[in-house]
Image (cartoon, helix red, strand yellow):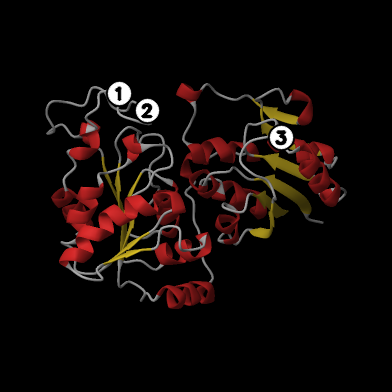
């Protein structure tokens, strides 16, 4: 008889993608997986064939939301044999505890010692393994360094999304110019615009509603020179439509962001521009990915001794790590 397991998902798209190898491991050993996820992350789990059911949690960013969590736990009571709590927060461990799920697995963190029955030691942030291995370790299995996330969209879902957006498979390049963490991870908008004008197919700009102005900063000069060449869909698509557009793209150019990891999991050709963060920790796990990071370029002078700083904004005020990655260099990497 299969073990019924509940997985409490992380709240960021990139992190959600990097949990897929854990889903694969759990499902392969006979666990039936139900994932509880926030609405803006849930579509990622619907692109994982190993997941039998996805429950949209009705919670918001921040706050304990005690009554809502108690109500959700009551709905889930007596359904599950095990739970895997992927975030490190106290509130993320409450539902499995309140639902009285017998086996509750997670990392130690934020005063939740009594909420978990199987606790892994949380390594210091500067010693933490790559995120895929960090999440996969919750399976209790070895060989984690071989894991690579894989996503798979239903063909009919992709076809409908492309029709709704007016796109043709392989007939465009996706730009994902945002980075939730901050501007020190964003390749300049002017560089994106210059690159778009040199491509042989139109560009599709994807992002959240908060990134619409940034995307319009790219689209406006492109469309002034080549009308209709840049389609700004930031804030206008569902996540499912955005995933479909990425799955069917000719290639994608992005910063170190959640959509970068989505593209890697679909295996599409991609160029990922890194600045303040490090591809040694969160690379796109895709054999078709080209990573551009001036920190490890011996020909770049003077060396970037300040990188990676992991800051939201450049402490030195120049963001040289991104500004000096030229559109021509990205174009060459796309070839």
Determine contact: label 1, label 2, CB under 8 Å.
Answer: yes
The answer to whether 319 is drawn above or below residue 316 in the figure is below
Residue 315 shows which numbered tag? 1
Determine contact: label 2, label 3, CB under 8 Å.
Answer: no
- For disc 3, the neighbor class at 10 Å (few under 14, some 14 to 19, many from 20) is some
Q: CA distance from mark 2 to mark 3?
A: 28 Å
Whole-percent x and y of residue 19? 56, 46
List the residue tagged with mark 2: 311
The residue depicted at 70 percent of the width and 54 percent of the height is 33
Q: Quadrant of residue 162?
A: bottom left
Is residue 79 in view from this perspective? Answer: no
Side of 326 relative to 107 (left or right): left
Q: CA distance from mark 1 to mark 2?
A: 7 Å
Whole-percent x and y of residue 231? 32, 66
The answer to whether 228 is drawn above or below residue 8 in the figure is below
Whole-percent x and y of residue 112? 72, 26
Q: Quadrant of residue 280?
A: top left
List the residue tagged with mark 3: 64
Mark 2: which secondary structure?
Answer: loop
- For disc 2, the neighbor class at 10 Å (few under 14, some 14 to 19, many from 20) is some
Side of 254 relative to 331 (left or right): right
Nearest the viewer among 213 and 34 is 213
- For disc 1, the neighbor class at 10 Å (few under 14, some 14 to 19, many from 20) is few
Quadrant location, the C terminus = bottom left
Give the mark nearer the N terminus: 2 vs 3.
3
Nearest the viewer among 23 and 36 is 36
The residue depicted at 57 percent of the width and 53 percent of the height is 40
The residue depicted at 44 percent of the width and 49 percent of the height is 210
Quadrant location, the N terminus = bottom right
Mark 3: which secondary structure?
Answer: loop
Nearest to viewer (mark 2 / mark 3):
3
């Amino acid at each position: 008889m299969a073990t019924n397991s509940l997985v409490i998902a992380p709240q960021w798209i990139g992190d959600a993608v990097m949990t897929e190898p854990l889903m694969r491991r759990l499902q392969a050993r006979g666990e039936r997986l139900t994932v509880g996820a926030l609405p803006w992350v849930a579509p990622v789990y619907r692109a994982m064939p190993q997941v039998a059911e996805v429950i949209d949690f009705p919670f918001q960013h921040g706050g304990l939301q005690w009554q809502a969590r108690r109500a959700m736990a009551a709905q889930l009571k007596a359904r599950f044999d095990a739970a895997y709590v992927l975030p490190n927060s106290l509130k993320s461990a409450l539902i499995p505890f309140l639902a009285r799920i017998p086996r509750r697995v997670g990392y130690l963190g934020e005063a939740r010692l009594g909420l978990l029955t199987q606790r892994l030691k949380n390594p210091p942030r500067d010693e933490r393994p790559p995120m895929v291995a960090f999440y996969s370790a919750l399976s209790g299995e070895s060989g984690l360094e071989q894991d690579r996330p894989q996503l798979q969209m239903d063909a009919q879902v992709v076809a409908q999304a492309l029709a709704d957006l007016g796109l043709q498979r392989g007939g465009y390049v996706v730009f994902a110019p945002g980075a939730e963490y901050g501007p020190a991870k964003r390749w300049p908008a002017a560089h994106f615009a210059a690159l778009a004008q040199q491509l042989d197919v139109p560009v599709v700009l994807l992002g959240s509603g908060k990134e619409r102005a940034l995307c319009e900063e790219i689209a406006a000069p492109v469309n002034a020179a080549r009308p209709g060449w840049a389609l700004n869909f930031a804030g206008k698509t569902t996540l499912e439509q955005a995933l479909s557009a990425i799955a069917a793209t000719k290639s994608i150019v992005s910063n170190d962001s959640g959509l970068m990891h989505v593209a890697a999991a679909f295996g599409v050709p991609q160029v990922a521009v890194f600045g303040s963060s490090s591809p040694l920790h969160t690379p796109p796990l895709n054999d078709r990915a080209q990573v551009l990071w001036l920190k490890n370029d011996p020909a770049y002078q003077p060396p970037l001794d300040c990188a990676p700083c992991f800051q939201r904004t450049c402490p030195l005020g120049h963001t040289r790590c991104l500004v000096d990655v030229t559109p021509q260099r990205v174009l060459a990497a796309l070839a």
